[in-house]
Image (spheres, rainbow, N blue to C red):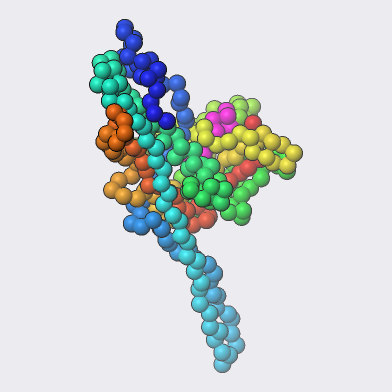
Amino acid sequence: MPLLVEEANKLSIEDRQRGVIEEIIDNDELFALLPFTQAKDKVYSYVREGTLSEGQFLSEYEDVPEGAATFEPVDTRLKVLAGQVDMDNFTTEVQSTLNDQVAIQIAAKSKALGRKFRRTLINGDSSVNAKEFDGVKALIPAGQTLTAGANGAPISFGALDELKQAVKLGADVLMMHPKVWLAIRELNRSFGGNTADLSMIENFGRPIPMYDGTPVIMNDFITLDEDQGTNTDTTSVYALRLNEADGFHGLFGGASAGIRLESLGTLANKDASRWRVKWYCGTALKATHSVARLKGINV
């Protein structure tokens, strides 16, 4: 919808403090670690192993059996994530002395678009909405999904160990809602141990928690109202291997990864200008054993 005059006035009242204080804050550490690969076309294709053909023990002069391996082609598609904002030219030129009206609106639109991407990165499901890409939850196969309890159960060290073991070549991170990490800290205290080890990951910028040598990242976009049996208030913990070779990674199309800004100029029938923010994006899971999910955790 067009920028309302009332909203512009809020940013230009005399003696008002310059800038806008952020109130909408999300905890999403996956985005900081996720590698991205450029897709040259709207369809990004790769091939997984299907089956292997073993040899046999033979008697003398017995025919040697023939067999060949099979392979599974996988396609994933880039999706278009975009939004735009219209700015009245009078508002832009006359009411930007205290706060740059255009800059603030573009920054807010970009932030909202980023939140949409990060939410979809966890919960996206193209079978429900064909316009969006598949997130972590939708990509994990049934064989890589563990259950804490038939009707939900508290988090346990044993369940976390099984989750880590399910990622065959080793998980780079465990991802969970902050409430689950608080429960793990409480478990540590109950056994007389410390609350958690801390370590540094290159480019992460600060110490982060560890569980048995595996970094733990927090994500507010993981839902807390998943159904498990008769329980409607459970959540999940994910083990992820993050790389472009055999793990989970992001995709981008076009010149660069991330949100891009376009100025579309003056509108034909209004004294207003339009700006568009967009991202051609998607996800890929190379090997199915590179991700695992532990569901049915009570919160």
Q: Position of residue 253 (x, y in %)?
A: 35, 50
- The residue closer to the viewer here, 219 or 99, is 99
- The residue closer to the viewer here, 296 or 163, is 296
The residue furthest right is 230
For image coordinates 33% across by 57% down, the residue present is 40
- The residue closer to the viewer here, 109 or 30, is 109
Q: Is residue 126 visible?
A: yes
The residue furthest top is 15
Is 215 on the left or on the right of 87, as rendered? right
Q: Is residue 298 visible?
A: no
Instruction: Say if 218 sits above or below 41 in the image.
Output: above
Residue 177 falls inside the magenta stretch = yes
- Tally of numbered discs: 0
Residue 30, by quadrant, is top left
The residue furthest bottom is 61
Q: Position of residue 82 (x, y in %)?
A: 39, 41
For image coordinates 32% across by 27% down, the residue present is 87
User: Quadrant where the C terminus lies?
Assistant: top right
Q: Position of residue 274 (x, y in %)?
A: 31, 34
Residue 223 falls inside the magenta stretch = no
Q: Position of residue 227 (x, y in %)?
A: 67, 40
Instruction: Say if 82 sits above or below 59 in the image.
Output: above
Residue range of the region highlighted in magenta in the rendering: 173-182
Residue 111, by quadrant, is top left
For image coordinates 48% across by 47% down, the residue present is 132
User: Quadrant where the N terminus lies?
Assistant: top left
Instruction: Say if 175 sits above or below 183 in the image.
Output: below
For image coordinates 55% across by 75% down, the residue present is 54
